Image (cartoon, rainbow, N blue to C red):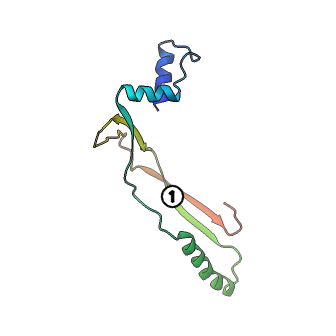
């Protein structure tokens, strides 16, 4: 985001794109000069359980017997997943030593549309 904004400002004031490229060293110097640093979210809402592949294999083996008894050839699996209208960034630039980091949003963080995904046991999606 810093690179895009700096290139946009350089273009608006007439700096040639060959003269200014917003390189990695320029970004580091800019952050250091203005006493800024990258801050990352420190908490995660959901952690995937350990041994999930073992649970999936156990579930698959449980299904094999009823499928054989009922003469089922194809298994369909459907799932719904949300698609959010607004993506909250995970990193922001803030003054060094800041304890609370505020991230601006448009207020649409919880609005979403639901997408239905369907697949079968042959790999068709």
Question: Can residue 4 be seen by looking at this rendering?
Answer: no
Residue at 42% x, 41% y: name it: 91
Q: What x and y, as percent, mark residue 111?
A: 41, 49
Q: What x and y, as percent, mark residue 60?
A: 61, 77
In the structure shown, which secondary structural element does the residue marked by tag 1 occupy?
A: strand
Q: Which residue lies furthest to the bottom in this view?
A: 69
Residue 92 relative to residue 15: left or right = left
* Disc 1 residue crowd, few under 14, some 14–19, many 20+, Cα 10 Å: few
Q: In this view, does 85 lie above or below 32?
A: below
Q: What x and y, as percent, mark residue 124?
A: 69, 62
Residue 98 relative to residue 74: left or right = left
Q: Say which of 9 and 80 sits in front.
A: 9
- Quarter of the C terminus within the rendering: bottom right
Question: Can residue 85 be seen by looking at this rendering?
Answer: yes
Residue at 54% x, 74% y: name it: 55
Q: What x and y, as percent, mark residue 75?
A: 65, 73
Quadrant in which residue 63 is drawn = bottom right
Residue 12 relative to residue 117: left or right = left
Quadrant in which residue 121 is drawn = bottom right
Q: Mark 1 points at which residue?
A: 81
Q: Residue furthest top?
A: 14
Quadrant in which residue 76 is drawn = bottom right
Looking at the image, how many numbered discs can be counted on the residues?
A: 1
Q: Is residue 26 above or below residue 59?
A: above
Q: In this view, does 3 lie above or below 118?
A: above
Q: Say which of 36 and 87 sits in front.
A: 36
Residue at 69% x, 64% y: name it: 123
Residue at 29% x, 39% y: name it: 98
């Amino acid at each position: 985001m810093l690179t895009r904004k700096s290139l946009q400002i350089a273009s608006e004031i007439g700096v040639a794109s060959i003269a200014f490229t917003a390189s990695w060293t320029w970004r580091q110097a800019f952050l250091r000069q203005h006493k800024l640093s990258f801050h990352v979210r420190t908490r995660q809402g959901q952690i995937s359980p350990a041994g999930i592949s073992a649970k999936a294999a156990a579930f698959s083996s449980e299904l094999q017997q009823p499928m054989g008894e009922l003469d089922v050839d194809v298994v369909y699996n459907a799932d719904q997943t949300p698609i959010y209208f607004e993506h909250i960034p995970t990193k922001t630039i803030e003054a060094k030593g800041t304890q609370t980091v505020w991230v601006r949003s448009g207020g649409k963080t919880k609005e979403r549309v639901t997408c239905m995904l369907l697949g079968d046991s042959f790999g068709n999606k």
